[in-house]
Amino acid sequence: MIWSSLLLAFVGMLVVIIALLLLARRSREAAENQLGLFEQKLQLLAQARRQGELAELDFELAAADLKAEYLEHEQLQAVQQKASQGWLWGTISLVIIASLALYALTGHYQKLAQWQLAKDNLASFGERALLNKGEPLTDEEVQLFALALRSKIAAEGDDAVAWFVIGRIALSKGMAADAVDAFEKALQLTPNRVNLLVSYSQALLVQGDEDSLGKAGRALARVLQQEPGNTDALSMLGMVAEERGDLQQAQQAWALLLPKLEKEDPRYALIEQKLGQHQAGLTGPVIELQLQIPELVYQAYQNATLFVFAKAIDGPPLPLAVKRLPAFKGEQKIRLTDKDAMQQGWALSNAKTVQITARLSLSGQVLNDEKGPQVSSEPVTLGTAPVQLNLMLQP
């Protein structure tokens, strides 16, 4: 109702501006006509003087009267024009102020309407999202649900369930950092809740940096202390260990998980396959690289892809093993085994002496077309014991 009134007022002021502009135009036209009339009369007086019909003194007096009349008219016209301009600019200013007020009011009204809608539907959103009653929430309703939960927290204080649901919503939208923040707020209120710790670990695993993986591992350990047979925790613990290059812990987690799964479970075949791959990796040659990426290099290549690969000193140029990772800052352990082979039949077990290379690529391609920073090791001999070495990428 209010915004409709303001809109009508805005249209009315536009009409006033148009009318004032038309009046100003007519005023200019009248001034031009007055100037033309003055020049015409002055020419007639000059013509009468040339023809002897008007004496010189009479001509000067008549011309002076004519000029005085013209100047008086011009002064009056100037005062009227100034007054019109004042009205014009005043009206324009009012239109601008009214427009800003209208925008602010309607924007606030829309936000208020969204907030009210979210608040009124909090219970039904919760039933549909958490209890699977009715139709699934649309993307817009998911956002309204999160808004309603935050409003509830602001009005009633921290609520572990509300923060947990906000975290799940953020995670479903791919906003891992927001999800982690919400889960941590929930954990401050209920630190040992199993499904919260599992969801928290999932968000940390999505982030994937070394610090997040460490936090995820500790959270999953707390879950397994309470529920040693929790299949979700065992599955993610194996994934965390694999990401950190700890193949033995990954194998232990998946070996505990496999007997707890039904063969019809989609995870069964995947875990069985991973166990076979990791067993091969544990029995073949192992390279453990401690790679350091300084702050300066990371800032220039933080969106790059890191490739770590091993090539045979005497053999085809095709790498024996390759790891593709996001760029990181600081130090990280990277493990290469037979399971990292690019081609079946050409793995670390097929070579005796290899060279390890780490390379950052902005294009995401293993070929170093853009001449990104890279570092290579001296030739190393593979054996039954893991090969350990340290490398650092330089600018």
Image (spheres, helix red, strand yellow):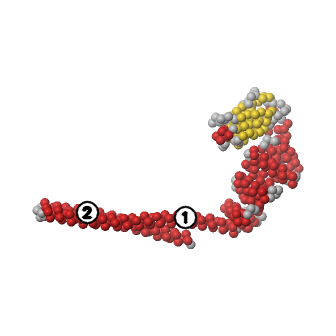
Q: Is residue 46 left or right of residue 210?
A: left
Nearer to us in this view, 110 or 222: 222
In this rendering, is residue 243 above or below 24? above
Residue occupying image coordinates x 54% and y 71% = 4
| Disc 2 crowd, CA 10 A, few/some/many (<14, 14-19, 20+) | few
Residue occupying image coordinates x 80% and y 48% = 217
Residue 201 % position (x, y): 78, 51
Nearer to us in this view, 378 or 215: 215
Residue occupied by mark 2: 36
In this rendering, is residue 368 above or below 55? above
| Quadrant of residue 28 within the rendered picture | bottom left
Report, in whole angstroms, how far the alpha carbon at label 2 lies from the one at label 1. Answer: 48 Å
Residue 356 % position (x, y): 74, 32
Nearer to us in this view, 379 or 197: 197
Residue occupied by mark 1: 103
Residue type at mark 2: give it. Gly
Residue 107 % position (x, y): 58, 64
In this rendering, is residue 26 above or below 312? below
